[in-house]
Image (tube, helix red, strand yellow):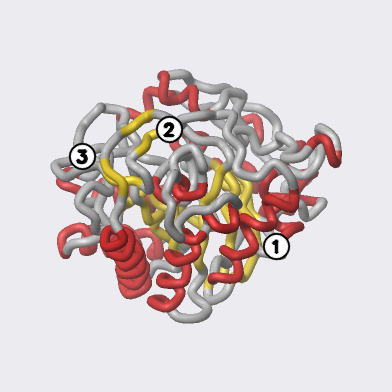
Amino acid sequence: MTASTDILFRPLQVGSMQLANRIVMAPMTRTFAPNGVPGPENASYYRRRAEGGVGLILSEGTVVDRPASRNHPGIPFFHGEAALQGWRGVIEAVHAAGGRMGPQLWHTGSTVGPSGWEPDAPVESPSGLLAPDQPRGQAMSEEAIADTVAAFARAAADARRLGFDTIEIHGAHGYLVDEFFWPGTNQRTDRWNGPTIRERSTFAAEVVRAIRAAVGPGFPIILRLSQWKQQDYTARLATTPAEMADWLQPLVEAGVDILHCSQRRFWTAEFPEIDGETGLNFAGWAKKLTGATTISVGSVGLTGDFMAAFGGESSGTMGLEGLLERMERDEFDLIAVGRALISDPHWPEKVRAGNLEGLKGFDAAHLRELA
């Protein structure tokens, strides 16, 4: 007997944002924004997911106003009149379809994009490192850090002005914000570093505080986080619940409403030595430790790891029973779906109708188009 999917379709209110269900479209880099400007094709892409029943759409990463904030020429800007007008078209299309949406605000730091493209300006990061003992680019000055914090705040204010329902800060996967968290890439000797994860969270907390001041109370702020890095899948910022609390609590106190906890596989227990192999995942522990609303994510409904998609691998479907059980236990509040929504925009509608046999797997060929 198939478990009821009703738990996925409970409404949720977070600040000023009312969501019809608990399904989130995960942010996924698509690189289809010529000259950094999203156009009608981008708007149609997101509108189709709203029409398909997604409760909250998080955009692909869109970069803040810094000279080297992106690592691929097709990544959209979230600054400049042309790009912001493009994003206005996106949110208007999503709202017309009854959806809710937030841009994921991003700075790629010292990471290398999939095409190997290089920006015109010097690459910047906390310490001029791509990974431990791997120099790339230059260490950020105090002025560069201040300008970056201000750029995130301006982008968030623009998002609210354009009519978006929320914003997400990309603080995961080895990009700039995460490079401050990670001791392997943060080798600074000033206030932006320290021996503890709480101290290395200073930059992220400053970004959050600046955004909160820019958008005011009530407007939801989401922060995406991960233990793993694209530079090192085995990296862990917090090896105990106490360390995780030291990492996350200051960010919630700074103004984060929702923690988006990225795992490669959502069903993996975060601290199995404490509660077993089926214990709380990252989002579960984040909720338990901070009381914040949390989003879980990681290979939902698919057999293959999402990192394999970058190597051109497709994935078949798998059941949702484990997900439904965790949500019934109130382990986390929302679930983000990524690749499945690229190949099947109507995934939520099918789940709601109980048509699980009709769900499509992920076809890697769909990454080459914006459909």
What amino acid is labelled 1 in the image?
Thr
Disc 2: which residue = 131
> Quadrant of residue 150 in the image?
bottom left
Q: Position of residue 67 (x, y in %)?
A: 20, 51
What amino acid is labelled 3 in the image?
Pro
What amino acid is labelled 2 in the image?
Ala
Number of the label disc, if any, that sits on residue 73: 3
Q: Nearest the camera: 147 or 285?
A: 147
Q: Position of residue 56 (x, y in %)?
A: 51, 57
Q: Residue at x 51, y 43 (%)?
A: 182
Q: Residue at x 18, y 40 (%)?
A: 119
Q: Position of residue 363 (x, y in %)?
A: 45, 24
Q: Nearest the camera: 314 or 61?
A: 61
From the viewer's perspective, is 271 left or right of 108?
right
Q: Position of residue 350 (x, y in %)?
A: 59, 42
Q: Residues within 10 Å of mark 3 (few under 14, many from 20)?
A: some
